[in-house]
Image: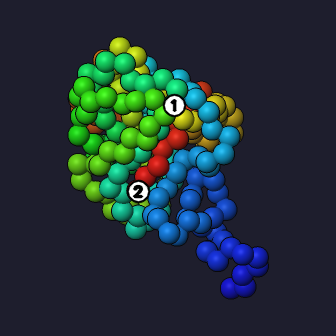
C-alpha cells in the first residue's frame, strides 16, 4: 500500500469520525471528534441516555468516560455507565457510584465490571444514567433525527426511575437531540 502525506495508519481505519484509530499511542474509541463540542443538557434524572459508539473486532473495552460540562451533578443518589451490544443487550455496567460527587468540567472514567472483548465490528451503545436532584450537563453536540433508511439515533433515551442497575436491554428508545461525547478505553 502506498502512503501519501504524514498519516501512517491504515487509511480505512481513520476515514470515519466514529473511529479514532488514527491515534495509535493510546487505545480509545470515541463517538465524536474533539472539535465543535459544547455544554449539552443530555440527561434527565433516572433516565438512561445512550449513544452510538463504533467498536472494532478485537477491541478490549475496560472503561467508559463521559465529561461533565458547566453543571455539576447536584445531590446524586445513583450513577453508572454501561456498554450495550448492537442489538441493545447489556454487555457490562460500571459499579454504581451512589452519592459520589461529580464536579463541573470533569472527565469521569468508570471501569466496566467485566472488560469486554469485541467479537464483531459495529455500532455498540454506551449508556449513562445519573439519578440526582440535578444531573450534570455533559460535553457533547447536537444531532438531527435519522433521515435516511438504515440510520440510527446518534443519541437516545430509555427507561425511567432508574437507580443502581442498568436495564438488561435498551427498550423503547426515544430520539435525543443532545449527543454526549463518550470515550471507550
Residue drawn at point x = 39 percent, y = 24 percent: 73
Residue 59 image-quadrant placement:
bottom left
Q: Which residue is mark 1?
A: 69
Residue drawn at point x = 48 percent, y = 23 percent: 71
The answer to whether one can see residue 34 in this image is yes
Nearer to us: label 1 or label 2: 1
Position of the N terminus by quadrant: bottom right
Residue drawn at point x = 44 percent, y = 37 percent: 106
The answer to whether one can see residue 157 in this image is no
Residue extending farthest top: 133
Q: Earlier in the sequence, mark 1 or mark 2?
A: 1
What is the x, y in percent for residue 149?
A: 65, 40
Question: Considering the numbered disc 2 on the image, is that residue within a helix, a strand or a loop?
Answer: loop
The disc label shown at residue 36, or none = none
* Distance between mark 1 and mark 2 Cα atoms: 20 Å
> Would you place residue 11 above or below residue 100 in this image?
below
Q: Which residue is mark 2?
A: 185
Q: Say left or right for 104 vs 168.
A: right
Amino acid at each position: 500500500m502506498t502512503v501519501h502525506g504524514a498519516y501512517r495508519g491504515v487509511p480505512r481505519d481513520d476515514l470515519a469520525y466514529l473511529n479514532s484509530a488514527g491515534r495509535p499511542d493510546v487505545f480509545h474509541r470515541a463517538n465524536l471528534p474533539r472539535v465543535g463540542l459544547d455544554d449539552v443538557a443530555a440527561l434527565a434524572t433516572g433516565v438512561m441516555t445512550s449513544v452510538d459508539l463504533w467498536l472494532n473486532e478485537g477491541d478490549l473495552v475496560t472503561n467508559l468516560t463521559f465529561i461533565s460540562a458547566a453543571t455539576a451533578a447536584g445531590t446524586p443518589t445513583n450513577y453508572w455507565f454501561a456498554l450495550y451490544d448492537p442489538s441493545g443487550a447489556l454487555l457490562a455496567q460500571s459499579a454504581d457510584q451512589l452519592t459520589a460527587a461529580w464536579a463541573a468540567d470533569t472527565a469521569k472514567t468508570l471501569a466496566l465490571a467485566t472488560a469486554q472483548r469485541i467479537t464483531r465490528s459495529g455500532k455498540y451503545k454506551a449508556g449513562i444514567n445519573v439519578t440526582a436532584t440535578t444531573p450534570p450537563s455533559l460535553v457533547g453536540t447536537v444531532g438531527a433525527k435519522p433521515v435516511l433508511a438504515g440510520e440510527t439515533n446518534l443519541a437516545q433515551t430509555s427507561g425511567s426511575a432508574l437507580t443502581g442497575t442498568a436495564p438488561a436491554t435498551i427498550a423503547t428508545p426515544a430520539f435525543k437531540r443532545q449527543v454526549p461525547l463518550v470515550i471507550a478505553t
